[in-house]
Amino acid sequence: MIGPVINTVCVPVTPPADQPATRPVVGVLALQGDVREHVAAIEAAGARAITVRRSAELEAVDGLVIPGGESTTMSRLLVVFDLLEPLRERLRAGMPAYGSCAGMILLASEILDTRPDAHCLSGIDITVRRNAFGRQVDSFEEDLDFADVPGGPMRAVFIRAPWVERVGEGVEVLATVPEGPAAGRVVAVRQGNVVATSFHPEVTGDRRVHELFVDMVREAIAARG
Ligand code: GLN
């Protein structure tokens, strides 16, 4: 005998917290550098952050942040941890990436004033000069106009920072130094799914660069269907 018909009650379904379309998984390369600050900034920008030290972890992310630190040390550790080629491969395949300071250096296609054995990832067609601002102004702060983000000037913290000496075709300049001896120097760029800054937005509490990056990751997820 068929039992009584039970009405189905439709309760609103909350998507799982880690559903990629709403909360992408963003890796933070955790070989060296200011990993914790980027993890906090990425979480605050609405994505789920995981640290990446192995290729299996790299495979699991929708996008990757390469933090500030020391680019030559990170370059060496990428080899030690067998991550250099897997990372190049994911970048070639279009994985979104954001590099801050040493991360910008690693994402470049050419690095000036580095060690001869330092590797670059060629994620973005730029030439960067390491420690470009010189010893006198190792570290400084500046308010910048940053294209593509609303909300007025952005406080930028530079710590032994590189600048961009050449931008390739298709690379958008997002910010330059407004005044002083380095006026006009390019310090933020974007090409496709890859964005890079000479400075450290993860230390200021201004989440706009990380929000821009998380939006880029969401768009990349939507585009791959
Ligand atoms: N000068 C460092 C390098 O060459 C970068 C500094 C930083 O990330 N704060 O890698």
Image (cartoon, grey):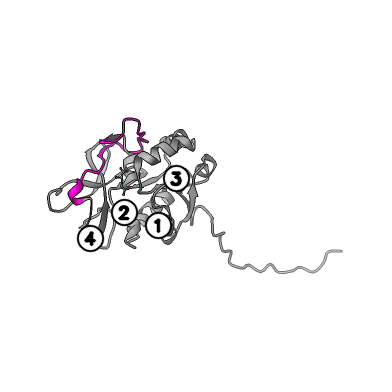
Are the residues flagged by discs 1 and 3 in contact, CB closer than 8 Å?
Answer: no
Q: Earlier in the sequence, mark 4 or mark 2?
A: 4
Up the image or down, 202 lies above or below 129; here it is below
Crowding at mark 1 (Cα within 10 Å: few <14, some 14-19, many 20+): some
Residue at 26% across, 39% down: 128
Residue 221 within the magenta-colored segment of the rendering: no
Tell how many labels. Answer: 4
Residue 36 location (% of width, % of height): 43, 56
Assign a secondary structure to mark 4.
loop
Task: Kindly check if marks 4 and 2 are in contact, taking CB atoms under 8 A apart as contact.
Answer: no
User: Mark 1 = which residue?
Assistant: 37
Q: Is mark 2 within 8 Å of ligand 1?
A: yes
Q: Nearer the viewer, mark 4 or mark 3?
A: 3
Q: Earlier in the sequence, mark 4 or mark 1?
A: 1
Q: Amino acid at mark 4?
A: Pro
Magenta extent: 112-137
Say whether residue 129 is magenta: yes
Give coordinates of residue 160: x percent, y percent. 26, 48
Q: Earlier in the sequence, mark 1 or mark 3?
A: 3
Residue drawn at (37%, 47%) of the image: 98
Q: Amino acid at mark 3?
A: Leu
Q: Alpha-carbon distance for marks 1 and 3?
A: 14 Å
- In three-dimensional space, the C-alpha distance between marks 4 and 2, rounded to whole angstroms, equals 15 Å
Secondary structure found at label 1: helix
Indicate the quadrant where residue 194 lies. Answer: top left
- The numbered disc on residue 200 is 2
Q: Nearer the viewer, residue 89 or 148?
A: 89
Residue 31 disc label: 3
Density class for disc 3 (Cα within 10 Å; few <14, some 14-19, many ≥20) is many
* Circle 1: residue type: Glu
